[in-house]
Image: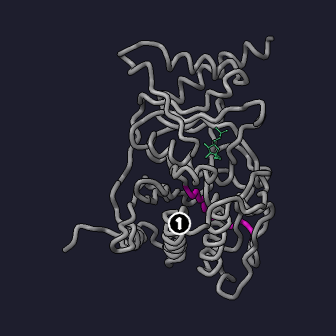
Amino acid sequence: MSKVKTLGQFIIEKQSDFPYAKGEFSRLLRDIGIAAKIVNREVNKAGLADILGEAGETNVQGEQVKKLDIFANEQFIAALTVGGEVCAIVSEENEEIITVDNPQSKNAKYVVAIDPLDGSSNIDANVSVGTIFSVYRRTSLSGPGTIEDFMQRGTEQVAAGYVIYGSSTMLVYTTGRGVNGFTLDPSIGEFCLSHPNIKMTRSGKTYSINEGYYVHFQDGVKKFIKWCQEEDKATNRPYSSRYIGSAVADIHRNLLYGGIFIYPTTAQAPKGKLRLLYECNPLAFIVEQAGGKASDGTKRIMEIDTKALHQRTPIFIGSADIVEMAEDYMRKYAAVEVKG
Ligand code: P6P
């Protein structure tokens, strides 16, 4: 009997953890896996298929959209729409919600928020990029989903995950019962369980932040960075600075090896850059399930009220002890800043 366990086998095996599940949730995860394989195929040949380059359009973030962003967005929306388990979708690439109102979705129970291709500005340089997804039960009673279905805290997520298109392609997800990682085996076209029950160390020796914005950082962030750079063998300091510019890649590395990723407020991003709904909440769910922490510097990410689809937040995410150290600095120097 092969030791390989595919994503499909794992999902079915875990379905029994949900006694009342009738398979809708399993089908939803399967649909995401299928779209990820299709996107992976294009990401892997992007340099050859003339799918690169500026599509000439700009997305709701005002950023130049590359053709692969559009392709990935279309694939995940199509997979979720056809699958019949989703009544509405929010995507980084679409300003408004995408309602799903077709015969096979009339009993859909879920809504999905997605960043179809995070870090896509790196694609031309062959740097890892990722897809991030977050799943909620709908709160509306029937019919097409509504914006209210997304105005939920991250604590209400029923699942969250990411796909990282890197040296290998991995799908990492949680349904609130731990975190598991699956590596795509191109020879059989299946995601296979490669990282069962991922657990994050409470500490580490890496910090990820774009220090190019240092002059604009709050004092607490500046003091924490200096703490990371001090010599102290007992606490593995100085930490190594690692910043890929692709949150999924930075956070995936820290999930496996320990460390902290920070995107604080900056002059260009006074509310932070990363989006609460389809980046910070799903990544926070995964990291917390692996034993880590995620906050905005003071408040748990998953307890932030969602008030807008593309709402931004600062994020401090990673090994629990390091995030707590950063939070201590933020509290200590926020008080100083307020006193002026
Ligand atoms: P900066 C990619 O555009 C992204 O949203 C994250 O994946 C990444 O961590 C961040 O922006 C990089 O932003 O301002 O450091 O280039």
Indicate which quadrant contains ligand 1: top right
Is 235 situated above or below 10?
above
In the image, which residues are magenta?
130-140
Residue at 69% across / 88% down in the picture?
A: 103
Quarter of the rendering occupied by the C terminus? top right
Disc 1, SS:
loop
Quarter of the rendering occupied by the N terminus? bottom left
* Picture quadrant of residue 170: bottom left
Is 225 situated above or below 156?
above
- For badge 1, the amino acid type reads Leu
Q: Residue 31 in the image: state x and y as whole percent.
A: 53, 74
Q: Is residue 334 visible?
A: yes
Q: Residue 30 in the image: state x and y as whole percent.
A: 49, 73
* Picture quadrant of residue 78: bottom right
Residue at 42% across / 19% down in the picture?
A: 237
Left or right? Give the position of 73 relative to 148: left
Report if residue 136 lies within the magenta region: yes
Left or right? Give the position of 120 relative to 2: right
Query: Dot 1: few (<14), some (14–19), or many (≥20) neighbours within 10 Å?
Result: few
Residue at 69% across / 48% down in the picture?
A: 275
Q: Residue 101 in the image: state x and y as whole percent.
A: 74, 81
- Helix, strand or loop: magenta stretch: strand
Choose between 297 and 148: the one closer to the eye: 297
Report if residue 19 lies within the magenta region: no
Q: Residue 317 in the image: state x and y as whole percent.
A: 55, 37
Q: Which residue is mark 1?
A: 48
Left or right? Give the position of 58 relative to 261: right
**Residue farthest along the bottom direction in this orientation:** 103
